[in-house]
């Protein structure tokens, strides 16, 4: 029966993982502005006919607003809004094209607001451009978290955590309770907490979705979003059903608990799929994000369940020793959960913050720091509690520590809900992935060509091209040069006849002998393709495509600490932490085994069998008053060791 249930658990989790990973994953949840044309802070010689807003994922056109305002406060409404670069499933990044009226000379601010079709998250921002007028860039846009979305996500995470934590405690920790009546009582209360948590999560998700549909309409919901949402609701309902339809004392209780835990993990996986999907997405990201969410929720939920049990036992006047085995058995799961949260959290941070400046300059980054600080404090307190339990010290301070841990982890869940509702600090303007290009000097056919773009930042620049004929005599004089700038393609940096996407060839004017200059407009910071065509009399054109990296504008060029990418260092740190955790676990296990064998071989010592729960035996066990047990028979297989007087005093209560 146990093998069959374990196979069912594995099948449920694998099926849900295939559903999330196998489907078309969006580039990143929460639509934010990746780039625009004109770029923020650009000064143009001619008024643009359209404004293009390129988002990181698909958006709802009906919920998109674009407003143009000049420095005098006059508003210019777009003549039309259209959606470009989309797909049938409404999952790919999209571009909003706003057709503008005729704009006079001056400076303008473009305010936009839209709705992500993947997670129904609202985002907004501002950019500036000038027509024959200098303008200051508005800077990176960051949308404030929606209060309703934050409250809903907190309720879902809290309920899911309570369910996972209660089901986790129903396993090995509860098996350490020796008294059958106490074990049945604790199981009944843990089942009730699991039902309450799953019902809370399902109800909160349903309420938030109904309110979102009332605000945005049914057209905003995609098929993929609806499928993931329904899957999570079904998993949460399954948790409620599995811990309701039979009495906890029945023999099938353990099987139902494992199946309910698997359903809770499926709900966690689908919750990840409904939220941030990271810049990289893929199977590795989905597994890491699910492990992080499940471990964090299970840790926080289990501590909350322990705190509620402690408070109820205290109110009913029950002995604190009844909870001591449960608390002792939670040590190993708690340590594992903390390690998983730490390792996966470091790895996932590389997807939501792109640089140190992104952490320090954005609301999302500062909230992430606050969450890490609170989690670290709770971790230190949990470590002290674990050491006290491990040493079996009778201390009245253990009970309030558990309550304080529960309060701290509740704050962590609140901050996690705020982060899930916020906009990750991954704007391209917050990171300098590549150093700006300075000069490109190369041979092209029988010519030596040098290209420089100045001042090499978004907006108007001058392309200076030096052309030198390497053959003497020259087969044909150079009669003209054209320069075009467009979006970077996958493979460039070489000769080719194809023009970059979005490029318009601009004729260059002769400056000196062999030097030509052309005015070009550079898009946002980052790589672009520069196409240079040299025309010669009586010969074919010599065409080359150069990969050029545009530098940041004046506002983005300022660096507080560092704008170097964090993805590589954080990923490497996560791998190192994982290897260290595995090494420490193996070392602890080996030392524990050696210590137990040394105790058994000590002369004059009575051998004491090791309990199946893996608890270290008491270094100075009390004599067994039962003659039948003095032969070293120990507990029966699967039975937890008896509760000692120290464990009875662990939570500071008097024994019966």
Image (tube, helix red, strand yellow):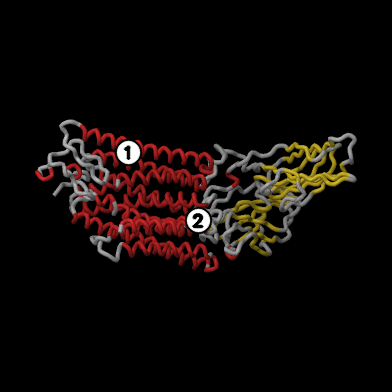
Q: Nearer the viewer, residue 376 or 161?
A: 161
Tell me the CA gap for discs 2 and 1. 35 Å
Q: Secondary structure at mark 2?
A: helix
- Looking at the image, which residue is at 82% across and 38% down? 446
Residue hosting label 1: 589
Relative side of 583 to 625, left or right:
right
Instruction: Name above or below for residue 418 compared with residue 512.
Output: below
| N-terminal label among 2 and 1 | 2
Q: Nearer the viewer, residue 182 or 375?
A: 182
Q: Position of residue 12 (x, y in %)?
A: 41, 59
Q: Nearer the viewer, residue 497 or 71?
A: 497
Can residue 188 be seen?
yes
Q: Position of residue 104 (x, y in %)?
A: 74, 56
Q: Given this view, does label 2 or label 1 mark the residue nearer the observer? A: 1
Q: Residue furthest top?
A: 603
Quarter the N terminus occupies: bottom left
Relative side of 234 to 393, left or right:
right
Within 10 Å of disc 1 (Cα), the crowding (few <14, some 14-19, many 20+) is few
Indicate the quadrant where residue 239 lies: bottom left
Relative side of 564 to 191, left or right:
right
Instruction: Name above or below for residue 95 compared with residue 133.
Output: below
Indicate the quadrant where residue 62 lies: bottom right
Within 10 Å of disc 2 (Cα), the crowding (few <14, some 14-19, many 20+) is some
- Looking at the image, which residue is at 67% across and 62% down? 78
Can residue 150 be seen?
no
Q: Position of residue 562 (x, y in %)?
A: 56, 38
Q: Secondary structure at mark 1?
A: helix
Residue hosting label 2: 21
């Amino acid at each position: 029966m146990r093998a069959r249930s374990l196979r069912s658990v594995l099948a449920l989790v694998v099926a849900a993982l295939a559903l999330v990973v196998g489907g078309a994953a969006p580039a990143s949840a929460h639509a934010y502005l990746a780039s625009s044309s004109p770029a923020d802070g650009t000064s143009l010689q001619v008024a643009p006919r359209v404004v293009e807003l390129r988002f990181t994922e698909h958006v709802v056109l009906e919920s998109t607003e674009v407003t143009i305002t000049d420095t005098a406060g006059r508003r210019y409404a777009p003549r039309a809004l259209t959606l470009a670069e989309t797909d049938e499933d409404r999952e790919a990044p999209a571009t909003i094209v706003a057709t503008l009226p005729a704009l006079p000379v001056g400076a303008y601010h473009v305010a936009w607001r839209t709705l992500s079709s993947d997670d129904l998250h609202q985002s907004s921002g501002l950019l500036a451009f000038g027509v024959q007028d200098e303008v200051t860039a508005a800077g990176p846009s960051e949308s404030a978290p929606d209060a309703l979305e934050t409250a809903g996500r907190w309720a879902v995470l809290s309920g899911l955590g309570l369910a996972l934590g209660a089901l986790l405690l129903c396993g090995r920790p509860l098996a350490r309770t020796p008294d059958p009546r106490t074990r049945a009582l604790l199981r009944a209360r843990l089942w009730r907490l699991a039902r309450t948590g799953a019902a809370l999560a399902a109800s909160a998700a349903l309420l938030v979705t109904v309110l979102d549909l009332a605000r945005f309409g049914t057209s905003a919901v995609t098929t993929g979003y609806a499928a993931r949402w329904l899957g999570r609701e079904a998993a949460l309902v399954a948790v409620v059903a599995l811990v309701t339809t039979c009495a906890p004392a029945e023999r099938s209780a353990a099987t139902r608990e494992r199946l309910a835990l698997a359903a809770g993990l499926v709900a966690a996986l689908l919750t990840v799929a409904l939220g941030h999907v990271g810049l990289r997405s893929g199977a590795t990201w989905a597994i890491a994000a699910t492990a992080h969410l499940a471990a964090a929720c299970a840790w926080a939920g289990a501590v909350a369940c322990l705190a509620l049990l402690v408070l109820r036992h205290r109110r009913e006047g029950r002995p604190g020793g009844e909870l001591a085995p449960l608390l002792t058995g939670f040590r190993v799961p708690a340590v594992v959960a903390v390690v998983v949260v730490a390792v996966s959290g470091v790895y996932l941070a590389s997807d939501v913050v792109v640089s140190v400046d992104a952490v320090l300059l954005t609301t999302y980054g500062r909230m992430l720091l606050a969450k890490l600080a609170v989690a670290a404090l709770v971790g230190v307190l949990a470590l002290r509690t674990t050491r006290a339990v491990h040493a079996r010290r009778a201390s009245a301070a253990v009970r309030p520590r558990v309550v304080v841990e529960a309060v701290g982890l509740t704050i962590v869940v609140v901050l996690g809900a705020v982060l899930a509702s916020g906009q990750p600090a991954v704007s391209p303007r917050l990171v300098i992935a590549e150093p700006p290009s300075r000069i490109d000097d190369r041979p092209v056919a029988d010519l030596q060509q040098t290209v420089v773009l100045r001042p090499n930042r978004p907006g108007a620049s001058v392309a200076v091209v030096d052309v030198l004929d390497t053959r003497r005599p020259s087969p044909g004089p150079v009669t003209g040069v054209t320069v075009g700038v467009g979006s970077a393609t996958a493979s460039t940096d070489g000769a080719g006849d194809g023009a970059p996407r979005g490029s318009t060839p601009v004729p260059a004017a002769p400056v000196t002998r062999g030097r030509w200059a052309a005015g070009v407009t550079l898009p946002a910071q980052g790589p672009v393709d520069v196409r240079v065509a040299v025309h010669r009399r009586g010969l074919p054109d010599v065409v080359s495509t150069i990969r050029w990296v545009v530098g940041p504008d004046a506002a983005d060029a300022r660096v507080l600490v560092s704008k170097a990418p964090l993805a590589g260092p954080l990923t490497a740190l996560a791998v190192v932490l994982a290897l260290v955790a595995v090494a420490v676990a193996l070392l602890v296990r080996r030392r524990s085994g050696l210590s137990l064998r040394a105790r058994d071989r000590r002369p004059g010592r009575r051998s004491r069998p090791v309990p199946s729960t893996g608890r270290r035996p008491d270094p100075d066990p009390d004599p067994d008053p039962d003659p039948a047990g003095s032969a070293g028979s120990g507990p029966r297989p699967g039975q937890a060791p008896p509760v000692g007087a120290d464990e009875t005093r662990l939570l500071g209560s008097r024994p019966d």
